[in-house]
Amino acid sequence: MKFRLVVVFLFVVSGMGCRCFASDGGRQKNLSKNLVGAWVLVSHLDGSPIVGAGTRIKVFTGSLWIVTEAHYPGGSVVAHQGGSYVISGDVIAATTDYALPEMLEFVGNVRRFRISIVGDTYTQIGVGNPYSEIWRRVKEPPF
């Protein structure tokens, strides 16, 4: 019985414990890593109708982001902006560094979101902004 307790304790401390009880830095690193890629807008978090669902794409690198939306057919770009971001815990702070001429009022803004990634679903909840949305990872072109 004593041997089993020691084995279980060692298992929890050495392997499983590191995954389950990771520091905030460990979770943050995982979240940052999982965020990298292309995402397509699916819906508002509350399920209300959304313009751009299926044609708005968000891309994250290790420190940069862009959002582009095109209307099809025709292919006109109706939204495009991007910039840099930092993650602290489960909050991303995204700074808009550039945008289309008709969206220049966004340049210099910092928007914060509480974020989570489960499988291929990225959820952002606006912190002080109305952009609470659900995105799906792009595995092939959405259009």
Image (cartoon, rainbow, N blue to C red):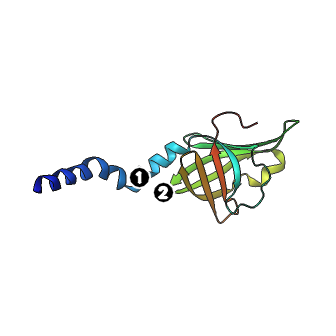
Q: Residue at x 18, y 50 (%)?
A: 7
Amino acid at dot 2 = Gly
Residue 136's spot in the image, x, y percent? 64, 46
In the rendered structure, find residue 84 and report the number of the disc placed on it. none
Q: Residue at x 52, y 52 (%)?
A: 87
Q: Quadrant of residue 40?
A: top right
Residue 80's spot in the image, x, y percent? 76, 44
- Taking 109 as reference, is 13 left or right? left
Residue 90's spot in the image, x, y percent? 51, 57
13 is higher (above) or lower (below) than 140: below
Q: Quadrant of residue 54?
A: top right
In the rendered structure, find residue 89 and report the number of the disc placed on it. 2
Residue 57 visible in the picture: yes
Residue 112's spot in the image, x, y percent? 61, 59
The C terminus appears in which quarter of the rendering?
Answer: top right
The N terminus appears in which quarter of the rendering?
Answer: bottom left
Q: For the view shown, which residue lies furthest in the bottom direction? A: 128
CA gap between label 1 and label 2 equals 7 Å
In the rendered structure, find residue 25 and report the number of the disc placed on it. 1
Q: Residue at x 69, y 56 (%)?
A: 109
Amino acid at dot 1 = Gly
Q: Residue at x 11, y 56 (%)?
A: 2
Q: For the view shown, which residue lies furthest in the right direction? A: 74
Q: How many marks?
A: 2
The 10 Å Cα crowd at callout 2, few under 14, some 14 to 19, many 20 or more, is: some
